[in-house]
Image (spheres, coloured by chain):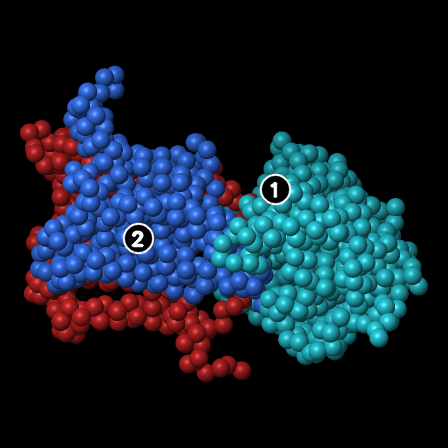
Chain colours: A blue, B cyan, C red
Amino acid sequence: MDDSAAIVFLTAAATLRTATPLILCAMGGLFSERSGIVDVGLEGKMLIAAFFAAVAAATTGSAWWGLAAAIASAEFLALVHGFACITHRGNQVVSGVALNILAAGLTVVLGNAWFHQGGQTPALAAGQRLMPLLSPRAGDNVLVYVALASVPLTWWMISRTRFGLRLRAVGEMPLAVDAAGISVAWLRYRAVLLCGFFAGLAGAYLSIAQNAGFSRDMTAGQGFIALAAIIFGKWRPFPAFGACLIFGLFDAVAIRLQGVTLPGLGEVPVQLIQALPYLLTIFLLAGFIGRAVAPKAIGLPYEKEH
Amino acid sequence: MTPPSAIARPVVEVSTIDKSFGGVQALHRVSLAIEAGTITGIVGENGAGKSTLMNILFGLCHADAGEIRVDGMPMRMDSPRDAIAHGIGMVHQHFMLIESFTVLENLVLGVEGGILLSRGMAKARVEVERLARQYGLAVDPDARVADLSVGEQQRVEILKVLLRGARILILDEPSAVLTPQETERLFAILRALRQRDVAVVLITHKLREVMAVTDRVVVMRGGEVVAERRTAETDLEALAELMVGRKLRLQVDKAPARPGAVMLHAERLRLVDGRGVRLLDDLDLELRAGEIVAVAGVSGNGQTELLQVLAGIQTPTSGAITICGRRFDARRPGDPADRRAIGLAHVPEDRLRQGLVAPFRAAETSILGYQDGPRFSPHGLLDRPTIGAHCCDLMERFDVRPRLPSLRSFQFSGGNQQKLVLAREMAAKPKVLLVGQPTRGVDIGAIEFIRRELVRARDQGCAVLVVSTELEEVLSLADRVLVMVGGRVVGEVEPEKANERRLGLMMTGSMA
Amino acid sequence: MSWSQRSLPAWAEILLVPLINVALAFLVVGIIVRLIGIDPFHALGRLVVGAVGSPESIGYTLYYATNFVFTGLAVALAFHAGLFNIGGEGQAYIGGLGCGVAILAFDKYLPGWLMVPLAITAAALFGAAWAAVPGWLQAWRGSHIVITTIMFNFVASALMVYLLVNVLIAPGSMTPQSREFGPSGQLPALSGSALNLSIVLALGCCVAVWLFLWHTRWGYALRAMGHNPQAALYAGTDLKRMTMLAMCLSGALAGFVGVNELMGVHHRIVLDFPAGYGFAGIAVALMGRNHPVGVALAALLFGALQQGGAELSFDEPAITREMVVVIQGLVILFSGALEHLPRPWIMHLLPRRG
């Protein structure tokens, strides 16, 4: 009995650990997407944040400086995205893809130039990381709690504040927002900046909390899984949170199921479980399981008429 | 001592407003005063300048010259925000409502009254209930806008304007989307607003409604105010004539038509949109070889959809179309390529949206829709020399300038684009030719040319259907004129015997 | 897109704007190199020597360029249809699977002159099939092609890992890769470099795409759809089928990366051979203005960067070959998302006409 309780606890903890960056990233992405700005660049923001978090933590010796650097670097990419998509009305997907590629290259180039370890940053000591607060086995560092708190916070901001109302409005019909005398661009910039903030936290979590340093491509598609979670959660905070937990569980289970034969099913390929978030999102988008309706104005640059 | 509303004081005055778009004068020295506690109707044909004038008043576009005064003070309207601040509110023809929001959320957008929504929303709720009682604007504040009827959505728009403290309410074609019952209800609301000293401006085509609800009528034509009348001192006929004016008929030399066999026959054609509105309402139509039939009407009465359905781009909900003996219906709708194969050609209403591909070279545009035959693409390969020669030929015959088949389509002027599209469609020697707005945005020389070509096609036995909102064009071109209102043909007139007054009455739905 | 708003002369539109965009990207790269502590001009010199300094390095440059041509054409062709195919990575991967499986199945029985065309066809078919699903989902089920192609990249990656670990792995091997292809499944390569016959295929593809887009009625309809779907509909084009055609052709082109990599170099199915070529295709297409000639030139440039960058990183350990990835990202940013950035400046500088 004790054994199974321990397994449940450990699986739950592992789920939360893997879900934390997804949750943070998804909440950030929600702000951006609800304002009508597609963000396929979550991955890149998270990656660059992870890198600078590790760099700052290693050089200053403080995890908090790491956190600050993570947020600052992700915000920088967010601003570039905003500049391209809001100010210059560029293609949002192209911009996101560009930032992903840029981040993938830049982190390795700078990492190698500064530390000469093939793109890795030096291993961080315990004092340079965000350590578990209650249980080392659970890995409950501060960002896990921040992630948990970010969900109701996001929900509250989107559904209960003036900013949230306007944010939702601008993602549905920017023309109506403009006609109401509210600046579309400034609203969207704020959304994009919020997105950068959360993606920064997610990146910091990877390199200075969950792991002890940055390694190349360490996000490994988690930004896209977060994007999938947003879609799966139909662009709403709590359902997106649920999707993050499910996807986190897949990951936790995939490691446990390695080589295990399930009765009646045979051996479940780990890769199938890893691909499940993507497959489920594809099915959802195709309308086979419910319908995910995106904000109406998503991806469309807003052009004022004359 | 200010006397009661016996001497009405203008709340808003515009004086000597000029506005042109790309060289086309949309407004010319327009002056107008709007008084509190009155309902002013502004009537005019498409393109008379009504909407432009109101957009200037609402800060959506800027006048080139002239002045706007609110309560006697000159004001600049740089954006809707300024207009709102000065008490001007506008209900657009296309509602600016967010469908996934509740009514209340839509109402408070921009006037939330604080960082948190709850207090402002509660206050707005009380205010909305008060306004609803006062003016009969009943809507459920918690309903989602997407679930509301069009009439209810319009009430939300009016509430939005009132909630922002507007003293001047502009409504752009408010009854275009309403049922007669909803329209009645709207008028009751407008009268209640007048009672409370709101200045209401009603932009409309429908003269009956003007007579029913307004105190004053302003008639616009060709960007100018041509008349101002007290409603009580005028009548439908007089307004219709003022609105339409004496049409100068550009003389098109044409012999009497000799109609032949029926080439196109539409039976009980119906098209229902997503909201259940009938865009085409059991329409019947017959078109014979060797005649030009023109469909006249105020835009938005189903003419666009009629062309789309006849050309096979949209599938009708029910009904059948027979073209050159071949029958198409909802189950076997066919596509534009099928239509072309049996001799139908189509010059679409909006050449830039549909008739050509802007970055394509003129030579490429000259075969749009005809690219699949052995003439232009034997074995699937485009025969560039033949296509180039074909384009040169079209340009020569229709005087398209500059005569450069390699120029990109968007680089031609509107008139030359239109001639190119027309040339392409007529070159196919169609048995049936559909033409939407043949001369919209085309200079005067090209207009004459295009009309002559259409008559020539008719004389060679082609069945020509012209859809136009220009009465003058309809009258000078057609052998028969059909008037379309609300998705159906409400009457047929012979152009020689038609007078503007009668047509105006028909088009504005003023005749039973 | 509003065509009437464009007021720049054609030469500025075709030459000046793209050149300024690329120049901006390289300016930023120069700043990064400077920040690392290396003289950018020195680095550029080494890079050029590394890319074209010897027959071997030219061979490698051309070999890399071959991949960029395939993925660049794939993205460009889809762009012409108004579709943004970000799935080149996955389509290349699956295309390689098709080519590899065909070879593993038949290399013992078929001579090279039969085996090679068969394997190339298989690469095209598999790549096309992998792109067809997102195409179908967009045309018939309304799911957006951008998102589905992204997701399909990950699914392809998971599928390939599974197949290589469990199914295709060479008996007795510890590394997840297939057995070596027989001689009939290997493309002849230039000795001392990875350049192989695939480059002929790449050049053929350039010509074929050019012919297809501008000289066939299907290409005509495809471009009409990309620029103005309403007009394509008016012309009688079935937009759903045209979407499928565009995606299948695009996927097939991306699938040819498998030919160059597996038949030309690795001679077995290996993990992760697309190595970012799919994404780089976006940069190539944007820089090449979606024209096959432009794509070929951009591919050459990126090939040279890839090869020169690798050489440079030997000389200057402070610069890794990922510098090329940075350049790709910046090119996409400046030529794609920020393409309108220099337009107002040029407008100011050019003398007003008339």
Q: Nearer the viewer, residue A142 or C9?
A: A142
- Say if B5 sits above or below A11 in the image: below
Q: Nearer the viewer, residue A149 or B249?
A: A149
x 52%, y 52%: residue: B117
x 14%, y 39%: residue: C268
In the image, taking residue B475 as reference, residue B89 lies left or right, namely: left
Question: Horizontal and vertical percent for residue A187?
Answer: 46, 60
Residue B143 badge: 1
- Residue lying farthest top? A264
Image-quadrant location for residue A67: bottom left
Question: Horizontal and vertical percent for residue A226?
Answer: 33, 44
Density class for disc 2 (Cα within 10 Å; few <14, some 14-19, many ≥20) is: many
Question: Horizontal and vertical percent for residue A205?
Answer: 23, 49
Residue A199 badge: 2
Q: Nearer the viewer, residue B89 or C352?
A: B89
| Residue A243 in view (yes/no) | yes
Question: Horizontal and vertical percent for residue B168?
Answer: 72, 64
Looking at the picture, which amino acid does disc 1 mark? Ala
Q: How many numbered discs, if any?
A: 2
